[in-house]
Amino acid sequence: MDKLITVYHGSEKIVEQPAFGEGKKNNDFGLGFYCTVNEELAKEWAVSSQRDGFSNRYTLNTEYLNILNLNCPDYTILNWIAVLVEHRLFSIKSPVARRAKRYLIDNFSINVNAFDLIIGYRADDSYFDYAESFLNNGITVEQLAQAMRLGKLGEQIVIKSKAAFSNLKYEGFDIAEKDKYYVLRKARDDEANQHYLQILEEEKDGLYIQDIMRGDMKNDDPRIPGNISE
């Protein structure tokens, strides 16, 4: 990563001064300011079917920041899922899912609050549904990994610490038109769903979360699929 990067924050409003400590604690990686280096993605995330949005643009100096990149080969798909289940609100439909949530957090989660900056995929729409299905023992970890690889996931950069916020400089905004970007966002989601249904038809065997727990699998287990970016 370059030391000085441009990031975009998709929103229904213009955000000139992002504030440390604000936001929703139940976002993918907890409290933070969620951005992307891809302006087109920011515009998709900014709109709804009813309204336009804004792509807020910033420069970010990453020098001296402690960065966690969940998409690098050091981490597996279960690291990403574990961080999600620790912060997002999941539908817990069974005792297995309750145990699975605790097992993932205990064995695979990472303390994201120990970092200035987090890089990871955004669990948007279908991708959150896949993670929820895995937690509820509905799909295997192999199906989950394959669905994530085939889908066009969006990578997000989350500003977490005061130091990172102080390195963020507002540069302006662009309007995101709902007539264009909501269509693109919906097409992305529809394509992901189509891939997922195909995977469900093809996959027969694999490791469910209950198998992972029964086998007391840890992060270095070779049976766990590698990082979803590979």
Image (cartoon, helix red, strand yellow):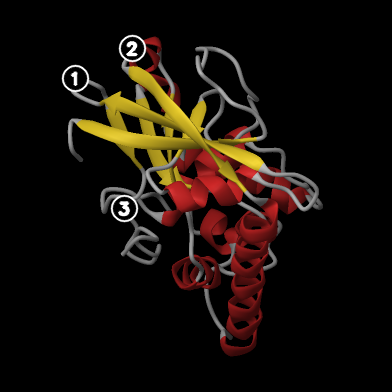
Please name the residue shown 77% across and 47% down the image: 92
Left or right for 184, reference 90: left
First in sequence: mark 2 vs mark 1: 1
Residue 220 drawn at (x, y percent) = 31, 53
Residue 202 drawn at (x, y percent) = 57, 89
The crowding category of the residue bearing disc 1, from other C-alpha atoms within 10 Å (few below 14, some 14 to 19, many at least 20), is few
First in sequence: mark 3 vs mark 1: 1
Residue 8 drawn at (x, y percent) = 44, 37
Residue where numbered disc 1 is placed: 64
Please name the residue shown 38% across and 36% down the image: 7
In the structure shown, which secondary structural element does the residue marked by tag 1 occupy?
loop
Residue where numbered disc 2 is placed: 163
Left or right for 151, reference 6: right
Q: Nearer the viewer, residue 137 or 114?
A: 114
Residue 26 circle label: none
> Is residue 228 placed above or below 17 in the rendered structure?
below
Q: Most extreme residue toward the bottom, as rendered?
A: 202
> Is residue 18 placed above or below 104 in the rendered structure?
above
Q: At label 2, which amino acid type do we have?
A: Ala
User: Would you identify the image quadrant in which residue 65 lies?
Assistant: top left
* Labelled pair 2, 1 in contact (Cβ < 8 Å): yes
First in sequence: mark 2 vs mark 3: 2
Residue where numbered disc 3 is placed: 220
From the image, state whether disc 2 or disc 3 is nearer to you. Answer: 2
Q: At label 1, which amino acid type do we have?
A: Tyr
Residue 99 drawn at (x, y percent) = 67, 45
Please name the residue shown 32% across and 35% down the image: 6
User: Would you identify the image quadrant in which residue 112 lies?
Assistant: top left
Q: At label 3, which amino acid type do we have?
A: Asp
Please name the residue shown 73% across and 48% down the image: 48
* Labelled pair 2, 3 in contact (Cβ < 8 Å): no
